[in-house]
Amino acid sequence: MQGVVLDTPFVRLICDDSLKTTLIEPASIDLIVTSPPYNLDLPYADNPDNLPYETYLAFQEQWLRRAWEWLKPDGRLCLNVPLDTNKGGAQSIAADLTTLAKKVGYGYHATIIWNEGNISRRTAWGSWLSASAPYVIAPVEVILVLYKQSWRKLRPGPSDISREEFIEWTNGLWTFSGESKKRTGHPAPFPIELPKRCIKLFSYVGNVVLDPFVGSGTTLLAALQTHRRGIGIEISPSYCGLAMERLRQEGQPSLSFSPTEKAEEFPL
């Protein structure tokens, strides 16, 4: 299983390496919503998640440069990453990726704090009841909101966000629960609420939304539910199969799931 494995007027799934694929046209994407590997030694099916930190940052810079090419001039990137990590030594992941993105050429717009309320993370206390070497662990993640050249959209389009959603979501503290690994079958899923909010807040109905690390397909499901056209890239054949199965079970009933179907009107 490699190449385009699902292609309809509403969703496209590409089983390929985001660093190497030639199946995305330059300046064709309105919004990227993604959560790349966290480098926390998670048991991914087909790629290592325990790289030396400098190697990990080099990987991040590589895909950020590819994403820059794919975005339209007014394209946006919502990047879900940890705030920081103590695994293998304290690292300021969100700050380091923000700096990398600026180096590539992205403009910085905002940081959204996602309070997922995961108290189970409090498993490493460092020096218990002592000032010797305590650990500080924040049970939050962040969504870095970046853009290519123009933050203001260059062409108007229809929005589907309600007044209540707009007021709540433009507050940079989002509180909702995470997703179950057992339910999705993926070691690092995010809940559909995360891409749904990003898509409705930062794109128009009918826009093209890309996730270059699509995993179990959550971003594609969110794109379908919000009437955008979704594209997902996934390097793992097993996760491509998982994403197709989730789309079949949870996606719109009108979708065709024939891998041979081609959608000529899909703008890529």
Image (cartoon, rainbow, N blue to C red):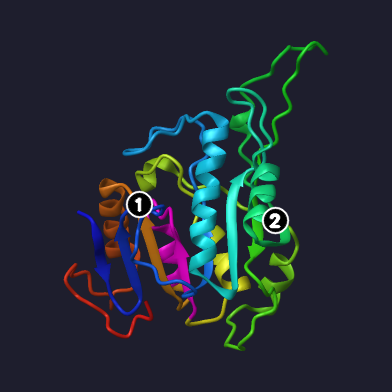
In this view, the residue in front, 240 or 105, is: 105
Q: Quadrant of the C terminus?
A: bottom left
Q: Quadrant of residue 88?
A: top right
Question: In the picture, which quadrant includes the N terminus?
Answer: bottom left
How many angstroms separate mark 2 from mark 1 (CA)? 28 Å
Which residue is at a point 35% across and 52% down the rendered structure image?
A: 17
Q: Residue 212, percent across and down?
A: 43, 57
**Residue drawn at 41 percent across, 65 percent down:** 221
Is residue 48 depicted above or below 240 in this figure?
Answer: above
- Which amino acid type corresponds to the residue marked 2 in the rendered image? Ile
Answer with left or right where residue 181 lies relative to residue 125: left
Q: Position of residue 80 (x, y in %)?
A: 58, 51
For image coordinates 70% across by 36% down, the residue present is 138
Evaluate whether residue 175 shows in this view.
no
Residue under the image location 63 percent in, 72 percent down: 201
Residue 264 in the image: state x and y as whole percent. Answer: 27, 83
Determine whether 251 is above or below 144 in the image: below
The segment highlighted magenta reads 207-224
Q: Amino acid at mark 1?
A: Asp
Q: Which residue is mark 2?
A: 112
Q: Is label 2 in contact with label 1 (beta carbons under 8 Å)?
A: no
Q: Is residue 137 visible?
A: yes
Tell me, yes or no, whether the highlighted magenta stretch contains residue 59: no
Q: Is residue 211 magenta?
A: yes
Q: Secondary structure at mark 1?
A: loop
* Disc nearer the start of the sequence (2/1): 1
**Is the residue 100 above or below the residue 249 in the image?**
above
* Residue pointed to by mark 1: 17
